[in-house]
Amino acid sequence: MLKSLHIGRYVSKPEDLRSVAGFLEAIGFERVPSESDHSVIFSAPIGLLSINALSREYPREMLNRLQDVNRLIVIEVANPDVVFEIAQKRKLKLLLDKTSPTTGERSFSVELPGEIIVTIHGKPREVPAGFEGALAAKGKRFAIVVARFNSFITERLLQGALDGLRRSGAKPKDVDVVRVPGSFEIPSAARAFADSKRYDAVICLGCLLRGDTAHYDVIVNEVTRGIGQSAQESGVPHAFGVLTCGTLEQAIDRAGLKMGNKGFEAALAAVEMASLKKAVTRRPAAVSKGSRRSATGARPSKRTSRRKRKS
Ligand code: DLZ
């Protein structure tokens, strides 16, 4: 029974092998390890074998080449425009480029070294533009909850967080800092800040070091769950800047040495999420069900408004 399909194509000169392989790799084919130095093997996510009648639309030059169909490779891709750019960057000779007016499918053929012709086809998917929060803290208020346990580390995280907020435009008067005994106490303090509705985001800083007992595992889970729960139930963004390390050395690296400062990173995450939350709540819905404005930002007609008032 059929196990797998291998299609071989031959380049006319051995030295062309490298550039053909380079192009196939650049567009996403995965190289299968091979000991041979006169062939390269690739795997594709889905393989299909197509038997084609030659089209009269093809230019004469291409028809002549296709007399030897052994030199044609047909590849379906998710976005032919991206592959087209790759082919252009590699200065591959374009033989044909057409887009179906009915299906929108683009199909183009390029000549690779070694007299190989590749026909790429696919339908570019429409990707929504999307939006994201900005690193703009000006006018927003932040609460920082810092654990005193392992203060040698957590005070460095705090300095990093304050630096991140300042660099994003936050004013010192808009930042409140509270210290709690250890990481276990962070969630309840964070929740109190979040419930006050006076802050745009809460930044949680602590340092849990694995000891010889099960204490670490119990607390790690509880602190993580508690901070997540506070964020979800209050609707106020919380940034997680609690280090969970095996050794003091690892913690030092993450508090300003080799691995950056996780307090600084947490502050930037808080600023971005606070900004994103504002953007989401202000943005008109794509499909408006009785909302004041439609997706285009237009208000509903007066007739609709009147009808709504009556009911
Ligand atoms: C008790 C304890 C221990 C053993 N280890 C840590 C730690 O590595 N990091 C930390 O932030 N806190 C630790 N704590 C303190 C607990 O978080 C908590 O403050 C106490 O159990 C009191 O509730």
Image: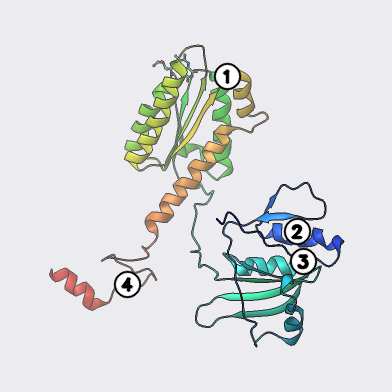
Sort mark 1 into few (<14), some (14-19) or many (20+) by Cα contacts within 10 Å: few
* Residue type, numbered disc 3: Arg
State the SS at label 3: loop
Q: Quadrant of residue 219?
A: top left
* Residue type, numbered disc 2: Ala
Where does ligand 1 appear, by image quarter? top left
According to the picture, the residue beneath numbered tag 2 turns out to be 21
According to the picture, the residue beneath numbered tag 3 turns out to be 90
Q: Nearer the viewer, residue 129 or 262?
A: 129
Sort mark 2 into few (<14), some (14-19) or many (20+) by Cα contacts within 10 Å: some
**Above or below 218: residue 199:** below
Nearer to us of marks 1 and 2 is 2
Q: Nearer the viewer, residue 219 or 46?
A: 46
Nearer to us of marks 3 and 4 is 3
Q: Earlier in the sequence, mark 1 or mark 2?
A: 2
Q: Is residue 113 left or right of residue 164?
A: right
| Position in image of residue 108 (x %, y %) | 66, 75
Label 1 to label 2: alpha-carbon separation: 54 Å
| Position in image of residue 147 (x %, y %) | 47, 23
Q: Nearer the viewer, residue 238 or 9?
A: 9
According to the picture, the residue beneath numbered tag 4 turns out to be 299
Label 3 to label 2: alpha-carbon separation: 13 Å
| Position in image of residue 144 (x %, y %) | 46, 32
Q: Earlier in the sequence, mark 3 or mark 2?
A: 2
Q: Earlier in the sequence, mark 4 or mark 1?
A: 1
Label 3 to label 4: alpha-carbon separation: 50 Å
State the SS at label 1: helix
The structure residue drawn at horizontal position 81% and vertical position 60%, both measured from the top left corner, is 17
Residue 252 visible in image: yes
According to the picture, the residue beneath numbered tag 1 turns out to be 152
The structure residue drawn at horizontal position 39% and vertical position 23%, both measured from the top left corner, is 185
| Position in image of residue 290 (x %, y %) | 25, 66
